[in-house]
Image (tube, rainbow, N blue to C red):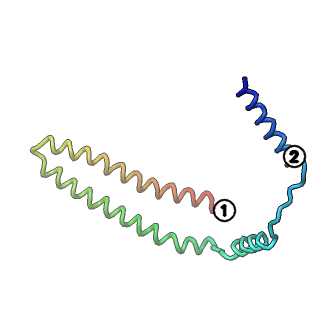
Amino acid sequence: MKIMKKVIFVILLIAIIFTIFSIFPNNTYASTGWTQQARNFLDRGRGSIKISDPDLQEFIRPIGNLLMVIAVIVLVIVSIVMGIKYIAAASNPEEQAKLKKQLIGLVISAVVIFGAQLIWSLTYNLFKDI
């Protein structure tokens, strides 16, 4: 019972303190100088970077084309190597089964590469007028 009375007393004391602090005005001593400096900093950043759509295309398109060319070259080389291995393993069905499993990974990677390019071009064409 004594502990309960102490808990209630502490809760009431905290409530009274919060009430007193909420009644009196809260004076802040913050200088308006640093807030104005922060606003100036944000205002400088808003207008300084201007990238137009043609500039962005000029920068991004060669990178995208280069990555696509590299991906296609890698896919072709891996396909040729896997085809040669499959032909060489004609007498060993276990090796052929293993290569067929690897072929699934090759097909999935090709779908991901060309799908990403398709999604990028569709997204760009849909949102370029906005």
Residue closest to the eye, 41 or 63: 41
Measuring from the top left, give residue 103's x and y in whole percent: 27, 48
Q: Quadrant of residue 126?
A: bottom right
* Residue indicated by mark 1: 129
SS class of the residue under badge 2?
helix
Q: Does residue 115 sit above or below 13 in this rendering?
A: below
- Residue at horizontal 55%, vertical 56%? 122
Residue closest to the eye, 123 or 5: 5
Q: How crowded is mark 1: few (under 14 residues within 10 Å), some or many (20 or more)?
A: few
* Residue indicated by mark 2: 20
SS class of the residue under badge 1?
loop
Residue closest to the eye, 21 or 38: 21
Which three-letter amino acid code belongs to the residue tagged 1?
Asp
Which three-letter amino acid code belongs to the residue tagged 2?
Ile
- Residue at horizontal 30%, vertical 46%? 104
Quarter of the image where the C terminus is located: bottom right
Measuring from the top left, give residue 113's x and y in whole percent: 41, 56
